């Protein structure tokens, strides 16, 4: 019952109309996007500097023979989907803000 009283009625309305929550949400989205950009840059700088031919040649016949290529392919798949995730997060923030202004 304590939870219902804290988040019920007037307390919930004051939380929705809190302007500092908007700033914190925008800061969180910017932080997530910057972290994603840094992750892409660091990954591809490290992956580009590894000599994969000698690593893969030494592991011929093992399950890890093409591990570096597989890792690069999976990273490329994730990093191609990541901008869509960023767009959805930004859209949710915008829709939340527009909904708050209209309501």
Image (spheres, rainbow, N blue to C red):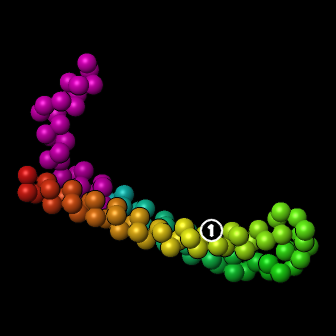
Q: Which quadrant is the N terminus positioned in? A: top left
Q: Residue 41 location in percent, x, y? A: 57, 76
- Image vertical order of residue 21 relative to residue 26, above or below: above
Q: Is residue 12 visible?
A: yes
Q: Quadrant of residue 25?
A: bottom left
Indicate left or right for 30 with 59 as reference. left
Indicate left or right for 59 with 76 as reference. right
- Image vertical order of residue 27 relative to residue 41, above or below: above
Indicate left or right for 102 with 38 as reference. left
Q: Residue 75 location in percent, x, y? A: 61, 69
Q: Which residue is mark 1?
A: 74
Indicate left or right for 98 with 38 as reference. left
Taking the view exactly as shown, the residue that stands out farthest to the top is 1
Q: Quadrant of residue 51?
A: bottom right
| Most common SS among magenta residues | helix
Residue at (72% x, 74% y) in the render: 69
Residue at (41% x, 69% y) in the render: 84
Q: Quadrant of residue 73?
A: bottom right
- Image vertical order of residue 31 relative to residue 43, above or below: above
Q: Is residue 30 visible?
A: no
Q: Residue 92 location in percent, x, y? A: 28, 59
Task: Tell me how many marks there are.
Answer: 1
Mark 1: secondary structure: helix
Residue 2 part of the magenta-drawn span = yes
Residue at (26% x, 20% y) in the render: 2
**Dot 1: few (<14), some (14–19), or many (≥20) neighbours within 10 Å?**
few
Magenta-highlighted residues: 1-26
Q: Residue 26 location in percent, x, y? A: 30, 60
Residue at (30% x, 54% y) in the render: 24
Instruction: Pick whichever, 56 or 39, lies toward us.
Output: 56
């Amino acid at each position: 019952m304590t939870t219902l009283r804290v988040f019920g009625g007037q307390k919930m309305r004051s939380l929705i109309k809190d302007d500092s929550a908007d700033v914190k949400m925008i800061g969180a989205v910017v932080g997530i996007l910057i972290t994603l950009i840094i992750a892409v840059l660091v990954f591809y700088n490290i992956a580009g500097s590894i000599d994969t031919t000698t690593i893969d040649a030494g592991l011929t016949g093992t399950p890890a023979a093409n591990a570096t290529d597989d890792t690069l392919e999976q990273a490329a798949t994730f990093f191609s989907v990541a901008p869509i995730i960023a767009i959805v997060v930004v859209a949710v923030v915008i829709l939340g803000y527009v909904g708050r202004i209209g309501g």
